[in-house]
Amino acid sequence: MKPKSMSFPKILKRTLSYGFQKLPGYFVYYILISLCLAALNFLSIDIIKRMFDTVSLAFSTGVWEGTISIILLGGLVLVLFQFISGYHSFLNEDYFLQFISKILKDMNAKAGRLELIEFESIELYEKISLAIGGVHHAIKSTILLLNGVIFHLVFFISISVYFFSIKPILVLLCFLFFIPKFISQLIKGSNLYKLQEDLVQTTREMEYYQKCLTDKEYYKETKTLEARPYFFSLYQSKLRECNQKEWKANLKIGMIDLLLSFITYLGYIGSFVLITYFLLKGELSIGIFAAVYYSLNKLMNSMSDMMELFGSIYQNANLAGKLYDYLEIPENPTETVELPPLEKITLHDVSFTYPYRNKESLKNINLEIYKGSKLAIVGANGSGKTTLVKIITGLFQTSGGEIFYNDINLSGKQKNLYSKISAVFQNFGKYKLTLRENVILSEIEKPYDVEYLNTTLDKSGFNRNKDGLTEGVETMMCRSFGGIDLSGGEWQRLAIARGLYKTNDLIVLDEPTSAIDPIEETNVYKRFNEISKDKTTIFVTHRLASVKSADRIIVMDSGAILEEGSHEQLMALKGKYHEMYMSQAEWYVR
């Protein structure tokens, strides 16, 4: 999964092609404006030369014809340059905003195409973290490349040719400006890039400790445990570590930049002395001297800007490479097939191993699930129940064996199952949306029917008349967004309603009632059994009192099916199921 990092030239090529691909019209228009700006910048130098030569000639001859026109032309060029420069800056911002929406869309689409198992890897989260930072850097790299290559580099080449036509030695001065700044920015970019990579893990830890101090999810327990000083000390430790790394890197960069900038300014002073010498010897006219002096000042500023740009390009491009690394994570090709109505799901010798683990989580599972049947999966924590459900629903691909939907082999085609399955998992989403949106999210394109929505909420046991629902189903399910908060049990009923709302052939409930008391859980399963009479259902639970109504129960242990049968058959076996059931029953008869 971990691709080799891109080389710097490849990143530059990808950056420009990516910029053109996302906004081709804007890309070309931006280039034309940059070229226009570069041309005006160079034209202003020739105008300065003509202005000084014309004024000097007028003083010596007393003929002022044409002087006013050249001054007005100079003023016009200056005003036009400032206007286009301001418009160019506006384009930078507008291009940035339009480009970022395109990149974020690509990132989200990429995440949707990755297999769920990829998210079990810490490496993916690091890639995503770096890619998020790389979004801005990819855009900046594109803009900076266009500015650097088109505006500053065109200006630098034009000035070099112009200086060569006057005095070839002046070209050497241009490069004397260029080389120290170039070295400085390469060192700066390299060090900042290394710093960014070094800080990824530390920054993530620091942000987590801050979350433990301030986030609603942790605040109550952190305060009750009186653990705030502990988390604050951890946060401070990581903050100091970040600051120390940044200080060392910036100190090194600053010292090198200071030395090389000193060399650049020596070259600037030397060039001024040199053109003054040529003027006194009569080898340069007043106009040419003024134009060269003006050019040197503009060149100094342009060179400084250009080197900052190229240094930023180097830094940003390397960081943008993290975005491209993420976008180029290999994807398993999936074949799209039209699935008929469900008749049977078959697992044949299915095995599964999580990435970076040696132990199998599922071992040679053989299972048949028929249309209209009710299957319960029970077992201790870590026995493989949830992993088996994720294999059945197509969220994970098998490491070995095959899975069939009717007679269709779904190896590599699991995504097709999503439209046929409705699932409610233990770690369900608590979406900061309205009550209506939280339910219809499972099938957002279905025509909205308020009666069907209300019926679904009632079936799940959600109380539509609870206090706080002042706007009915349009009430926001988040206090920080101006709505209300729900209890854990209410959120679970809402998640069940979301699962029931979707049109499906198979309904899966994976520990969806863990936050509901046993009596209410019994009521939920009774209602569930009533509304799923003609449905194929699978439910996972650790409370065995709820599985009596299942047609078949399988008992998982260490990734394998240990026992299988009805409640009565398994109780008669006096095995693992009997042991678990009697152990739980003791708590209710004491």
Image (cartoon, rainbow, N blue to C red):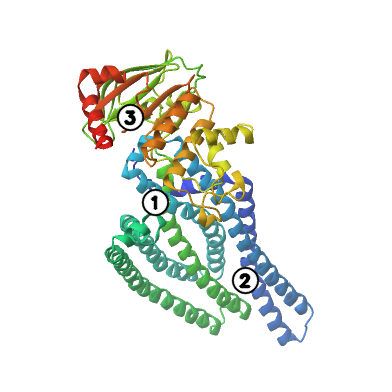
Q: Earlier in the sequence, mark 1 or mark 2?
A: 2
What residue appears at the point 59 percent right and 36 percent down from the top-left corner? Answer: 454
| SS label for mark 3 | helix
What residue appears at the point 56 percent right and 60 percent down from the top-left corner? Answer: 154
Q: Is residue 43 left or right of residue 305?
A: right
Could one spot residue 120 in this view of the protein? yes
Q: Quadrant of residue 332?
A: top left
User: Can you identify the residue that label 1 sits on?
Assistant: 130
- Of residues 547 and 23, the one drawn nearer to the viewer in this rendering: 547
Q: Earlier in the sequence, mark 3 or mark 1?
A: 1
Q: In which quadrant will I find the N terminus?
A: top left
Residue reaching furthest top? 407
Tell me which amino acid carries mark 1.
Leu
- Residue 45 image label: 2
- Between the C-alphas of marks 3 and 1, the distance is 47 Å
Residue 113 against residue 38 in the figure, above or below: above
- Between the C-alphas of marks 1 and 2, the distance is 44 Å
| SS label for mark 1 | helix
| SS label for mark 2 | helix
User: Can you identify the residue that label 3 sits on?
Assistant: 545
Circle 3 or circle 2, nearest the eye: 3
